[in-house]
Every structure is written in structure tokens, then in C-alpha cells.
Image (cartoon, helix red, strand yellow):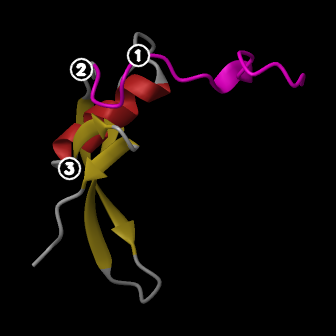
Amino acid sequence: MTNDPDNHGPYHRTGEPGGPGCAVRELSITLKAQDGSAIPAYLLDAGDAATELELLRTVASGMGIRWGHDDLGWWAVVPRET
């Protein structure tokens, strides 16, 4: 790795956090908690056509996360459970 400020390695993010997502297929599954109880969940599959960034954008959007940018940089609004 060099000290070149323009070289971000293989993980350089392109686009904006609120950029395009991707189509996903979902499969309803059940996870097992540490206490043995069942936790309902979804397994999301974006297939080979999408990148992990597009999948993460889709998940974030589905969770209600909203992105913004101002003079201080990027920020995200994350809904809280009440």
C-alpha cells in the first residue's frame, strides 16, 4: 500500500451512500438466539448482478436509514425503536 492519497485500495467507495440499491430475493428464516429462542429473520440474496455496496444500500434503505451531506461531511439518520 502506498501513501498516495488517491489510492484507496480495493475498497474505494464510489457514488454516494444513498445511491442505487439492487433487486433482492428474500427467504424467510429462523435464527436461534443464545438462550435457544427463535428469532424470525430474512436471508437476502442479490445474486451475481449486484455488488456488496448495492446490497448494503438496499438493506439500509429498507431499515429506513436516510443519508445527507453538509459542510461537516456525511451523516445518516437511523430510526430508533420506541
Indicate the secondary structure of the residue bearing disc 3: loop
Q: Is 64 drawn above or below residue 21 in the view shown?
A: below
Q: Mark 3 points at which residue?
A: 63
Identity of the residue drawn at 29% across and 71% down:
39
Q: Disc 1 marks which residue?
A: 50
Magenta highlight: main SS: loop
Residue at image coords 27%, 18%: 20
Compare residues 26 and 71 and report the one nearer the observer.
71
Does 32 appear above or below 8?
Answer: below
Q: Give the range drawn in magenta.
A: 1-19
Q: Position of residue 30 (x, y in %)?
A: 30, 62
Amino acid type at circle 3 is Met
The answer to the question of whether label 2 and label 1 lie on touching residues, with beta carbons closer than 8 A, is: yes
Q: Name the residue under label 2.
A: 23
> Which residue appears at 33% of the width and 46% of the height?
75
User: In terms of depth relative to the viewer, which is nearer, 42 or 3?
Assistant: 3
Q: Quadrant of residue 66?
A: top left
- What amino acid does circle 2 point to? Ala
Judging from the image, what secondary structure is the residue with disc 2 in?
loop
